[in-house]
């Protein structure tokens, strides 16, 4: 029916056009019904009365239900959140704001007033939202999210510190040692506690957070946290800066302020933590501590030497020069900033590191900020809980309690919490379970909102140039564990681009985090596709080994091993590493081994052209071999003034009338090239005899910091 017929016919059926869009559709339906009724051959459809409905057969009832189901299926279904703004509805339904607010007026049975601008931030929820979507022509299914209101009061939160000075006691300050790699952070701690940690560390570099208490000659105790300096351990340094009372920034006097030094300074600024600068290696002949202070000033650290408030101590950790002055400066800084704790308060700690340890299960390195941790207490960290089974202090001794300001390893975790989470004490196991339930519900809501945002964003992309944006998105995406089934199917196909499947296992969560940062930096998909099948903390399991065998994957183990009784055959390549540099090198070599072989020229012999002869159309180069051997079947090149001018095979190689197969150093011969040499041969040219060998090529991928 033509829409031009609408105005003249509306009056006949008692309708009024109140707007455009949806009301027009409604009017068209009524007009169609009106036209049918007024036509000559119109027969009113038979309606079932109460008696008819009672007398319907089962077949008729089933047919009616099937018809209704089919009609419902024809209406598109949208999955939406419980609350939506008008702007969200416009984007989702591809309708105009006018149509959305017209549908709202119809649902509320109010008159609709047209306007130039509509309040697109207006929020709608069920049942009005359902009615609006129905008027717009959609069925809805709401994202299933749990209600948080009923669980809100059951979460465990950190209690504030009391202001009653009589209750508070002083505790050991927590000091994070930060700085660039190989600037002597661990060596300083060795000197302070008269131990030798740096010599025992793989490669001489710290690759995980070490937390331990150091008793000082003044009978004070300081808890130190040694953080890695390499660029891939950024997150671990960030955790160290957040949990500490003081940061000891170590800068080498011969190197000055470096990349990770600047990164550490930025972390200190974000955490607003007091800082003490230790200028190490002042005993070296090329040490320049004054330049270090100037560099620090340029990066926002004002030392006392230039009128600032940051103490800077010149030391030599290796020769133990200036250490007493450094210790006193740390203690004075701690006293200045009043580091106290309430012994009767709820336990509040910080998960520095988490790992799976053979014989102990899930183990976490915890540093306490408040309270006293005892065996048998209940802890909650993130979505994990623990009934403390054992506590091992910094010296390796099993203890029954841990005081504030101290660090130790805690066992009894049911699941492994992530490093960086806050550990809080629960009064009982029931309270801990209620808190975990609430946090799980909260996570569901956050995930649902995130899913909705992703869906909305995808719909926006589809309305624009989707293919181009999708390609851009894929180049920037983060690597996720690949689907096992898809990988299994693709491994049976012949692909144009080589594929490397890998499995990675590490000893602690922090190391795994650093390795994943390296994997996420991979950007050479056009050379070789890198599929991360699985990764995690702990020992290599049988199921993971079977997956690797099935998918022909390579396994990388960092500071860990396979479970006991796992028979690792030669079918799977396994790399075991304790130094992250070596892991990256082997990974790059494995990627290179998947790439096609490249030709490499090996020089077998060299000769100089002494004279050139012309015999009919044949050009003969009279040469003398200066090194190696010339073999007639190999490839030869001509170099003139350092520039390659010809490459090809020989027709023959002669000495007087004798045809030779090879000529050694010091001998002369005549060389005839196959075909025509365009550039010709001149006296003084250099001729090389080459043999071509194939060798693996290197990947162009190089992770940041390597």
Image (cartoon, grey):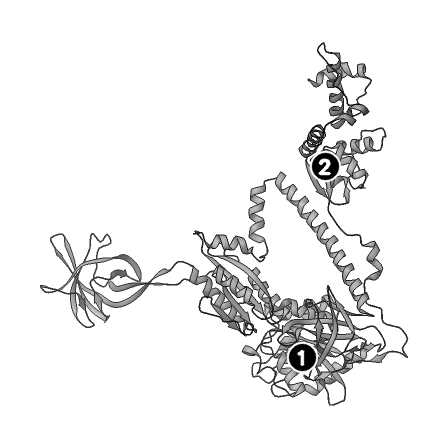
Q: How far across and how far down the image is residue 667, in percent?
A: 17, 71
Neighbor class of circle 1 (other Cα within 10 Å; few <14, some 14-19, many 20+) is many
Q: Residue placed at 77% from the left, 52% from the top?
A: 146
Q: Name above or below for residue 72 compared with residue 636.
A: above
Image x and y of residue 344, in percent: 85, 77
Q: Quadrant of the N terminus?
A: top right
Residue at x-position 68% and y-position 49%: 451
Helix, strand or loop at label 1? It is: strand
Circle 2 sits on which residue? Answer: 139
Query: Residue beneath label 1, please?
Result: 278
Q: Position of residue 303 (x, y in %)?
A: 71, 75
Within-10-Å neighbours for mark 2: few <14, some 14–19, many 20+: some
Q: Nearer the viewer, residue 353 or 318?
A: 353
Marks 1 and 2, how far apart at CA: 67 Å
Report the side of 59 relative to 542 (left or right): right
Query: Where is 621 relative to 134, above or below?
Result: below
Which element carries disc 2, helix, strand or loop?
strand
Q: Which circle's residue, 1 or 2, is located before the other in the chain? A: 2
């Amino acid at each position: 029916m033509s829409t031009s017929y609408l105005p003249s016919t509306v009056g006949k059926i008692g309708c009024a056009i109140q707007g455009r869009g949806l009301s027009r559709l409604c009017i068209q339906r009524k007009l169609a019904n009106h036209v049918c009724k007024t036509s000559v051959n119109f027969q009113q459809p038979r309606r079932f009365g109460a008696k008819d409905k009672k007398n319907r057969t089962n077949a008729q009832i089933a047919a009616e239900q099937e018809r209704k189901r089919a009609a419902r299926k024809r209406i598109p279904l949208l999955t939406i959140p419980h609350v939506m703004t008008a702007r969200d509805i416009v984007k989702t339904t591809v309708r105009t704001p006018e149509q959305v607010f017209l549908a709202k007026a119809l649902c509320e049975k109010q008159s609709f007033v047209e306007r130039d601008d509509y309040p697109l931030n207006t929020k709608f929820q069920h049942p009005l939202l359902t009615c609006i979507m129905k008027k717009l022509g959609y069925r809805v299914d709401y994202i299933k999210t749990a209600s948080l209101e009923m669980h809100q009061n059951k979460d465990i939160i950190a209690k504030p510190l009391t202001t009653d000075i009589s209750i508070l006691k002083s505790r050991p300050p927590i000091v994070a040692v930060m700085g660039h790699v190989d600037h002597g952070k661990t060596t300083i701690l060795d000197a302070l506690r008269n131990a030798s940690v740096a010599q025992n560390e793989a490669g001489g570099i710290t690759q995980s957070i070490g937390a331990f208490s150091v008793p000082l000659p003044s009978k004070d105790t300081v808890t130190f946290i040694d953080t890695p300096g390499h660029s891939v351990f950024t997150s671990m340094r960030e955790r160290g800066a957040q949990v500490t009372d003081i940061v000891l920034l170590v800068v080498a006097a011969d190197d000055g302020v470096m990349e990770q030094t600047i990164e550490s300074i930025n972390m200190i600024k974000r955490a607003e933590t007091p800082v003490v600068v230790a200028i190490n290696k002042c005993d070296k002949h090329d040490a320049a501590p004054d330049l270090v202070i100037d560099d620090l000033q340029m990066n926002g650290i004002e030392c006392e030497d230039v009128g600032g408030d940051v103490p800077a101590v010149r030391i030599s950790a290796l020769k133990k020069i200036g250490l007493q002055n450094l210790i006193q400066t740390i203690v004075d800084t701690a006293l200045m900033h009043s580091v106290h704790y309430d012994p009767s308060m709820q336990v509040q700690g910080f998960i520095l590191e988490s790992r799976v340890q053979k014989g102990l299960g899930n183990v976490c390195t915890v540093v306490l900020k408040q309270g006293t941790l005892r065996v048998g207490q209940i802890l909650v960290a993130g979505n994990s809980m623990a009934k403390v089974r054992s506590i091992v202090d910094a010296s390796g001794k099993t203890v029954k309690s841990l005081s504030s300001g101290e660090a130790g390893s805690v066992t009894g975790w049911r699941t492994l919490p992530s490093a960086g989470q806050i550990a809080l004490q629960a009064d009982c196991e029931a309270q801990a379970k209620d808190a975990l339930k609430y946090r799980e519900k909260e996570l569901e809501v956050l995930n649902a909102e995130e899913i909705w945002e992703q869906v909305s964003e995808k719909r926006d992309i589809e309305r624009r140039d989707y293919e181009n944006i999708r390609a851009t998105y894929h180049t920037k995406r983060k690597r996720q564990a690949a689907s096992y089934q898809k990988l299994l199917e693709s491994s049976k196909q012949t692909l144009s681009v080589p594929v490397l499947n890998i499995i990675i296992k590490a000893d602690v969560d922090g190391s795994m985090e650093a390795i994943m940062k390296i994997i996420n930096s991979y950007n050479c998909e056009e050379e070789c596709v890198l599929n991360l099948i699985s990764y995690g903390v702990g020992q290599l399991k049988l199921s993971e080994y079977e997956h690797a065998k099935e998918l022909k994957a390579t396994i990388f183990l960092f500071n860990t091993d396979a479970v006991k009784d796992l028979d690792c055959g030669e079918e799977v390549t396994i790399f075991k590493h304790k130094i992250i540099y070596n892991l990256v090198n082997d990974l790059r070599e494995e990627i290179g081994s998947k790439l096609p072989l490249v030709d490499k020229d090996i020089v077998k012999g060299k000769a100089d052209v002494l004279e050139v002869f012309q015999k009919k159309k044949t050009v003969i180069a009279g040469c003398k071999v200066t090194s190696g051997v010339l073999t007639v079947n190999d490839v030869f090149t001509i170099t003139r003034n350092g520039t390659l001018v010809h490459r090809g095979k020989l027709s023959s190689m002669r000495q007087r009338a004798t045809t030779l197969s090879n000529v050694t150093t010091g001998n002369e011969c005549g060389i005839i090239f196959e075909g025509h040499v365009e550039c010709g041969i001149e006296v003084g040219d250099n001729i090389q005899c080459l043999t071509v060998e194939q060798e693996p090529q290197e990947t162009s991928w190089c992770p940041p910091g390597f």
